[in-house]
Image (spheres, rainbow, N blue to C red):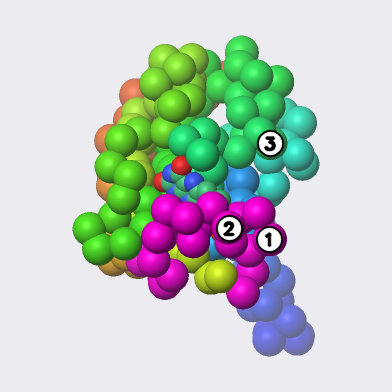
Amino acid sequence: MFPGLIRGLRVFLYQVERKADLMKALITTASKHGSTAEIGGAIEKVLLEHGIGTDALEPEAVSSLHGYDLVVLGSAVYAGHWMKSMRELVERLAEELAGPPVWLFSSGPIGDPPKPDEDPVDVAEIMALTGARGHAVFAGKIDRSRLGFGERAIVSALKVPEGDFRDWGEIRTWASNIVEGVAAESVTIPLPDGATHRPLA
Ligand SMILES: Cc1cc2nc3c(=O)[nH]c(=O)nc-3n(C[C@H](O)[C@H](O)[C@H](O)COP(=O)(O)O)c2cc1C
């Protein structure tokens, strides 16, 4: 009786079971004009493609890291620094950030070759605090029509070229490396109940 319904129910239950078994990633990005958030979106897409569940949140919306198997923190760089909202998140959740594997990325350098080429000022400290597995600097985007008056003045004075310098291939490769890193680690990270994560597909 109702074989279609029963099959549908089985599929549903299977999916619920699989979902409960998924690893979960938090991807949080501090972005003033949206381009860093889009990088976060590209990273999220790669993780989802590898069967990792994701939450993509703005830093202000993150109150706890509970339940996350990995964390990606990304920030746009302004005047050599990560954005305040992300620095505040790191301060607020410093203790919890010592738990799960953490990856950092900065988005900022502009031009070809991208400039500046030194790391943002805050990154060394955040690396040390979180024990981050890695930090990537991705080239950013300047769209003058979206900048405020003061920003436009700075960009003009420094002769910063306009354009979208983000390298999506590089970003996707970096995200894939995260998946590989977590997959390798997941065999040895015990869960609270003593189980281990299922190796990733
Ligand atoms: C006023 C201003 C200052 C900037 N300062 C830096 C900087 O110090 N280092 C850097 O790498 N990029 C700098 N940038 C480039 C931005 O980080 C880049 O445009 C980035 O893609 C912006 O990200 P968002 O769209 O997420 O805000 C600056 C951009 C502006 C407009």
Q: Secondary structure at mark 3?
A: helix
Question: Which comes before the other along the chain, label 3 or label 1?
Answer: 3
Magenta-colored stretch includes residue 164: yes
Can you tell which mark lies on residue 85? 3
Asked if residue 23 is positioned above or below residue 68 in the image, the reply reads below
Residue at 40% over, 60% down: 159
What residue is disc 2 on?
153
Q: Nearer the viewer, mark 3 or mark 2?
A: 2
Residues under numbered marks 1 and 2 in contact, where contact means CB atoms less than 8 Å apart:
yes
Local packing at callout 3 (Cα closer than 10 Å; few below 14, some 14-19, many 20+) is some
What residue is disc 1 on?
149
Asked if residue 181 is positioned above or below residue 142 in the image, the reply reads above
Q: Which residues are magenta?
A: 145-165
Can you tell which mark lies on residue 169? none
Q: Secondary structure at mark 2?
A: helix
Amino acid bearing label 2: Ala
Q: Who is closer to the viewer here, 141 or 102?
A: 141
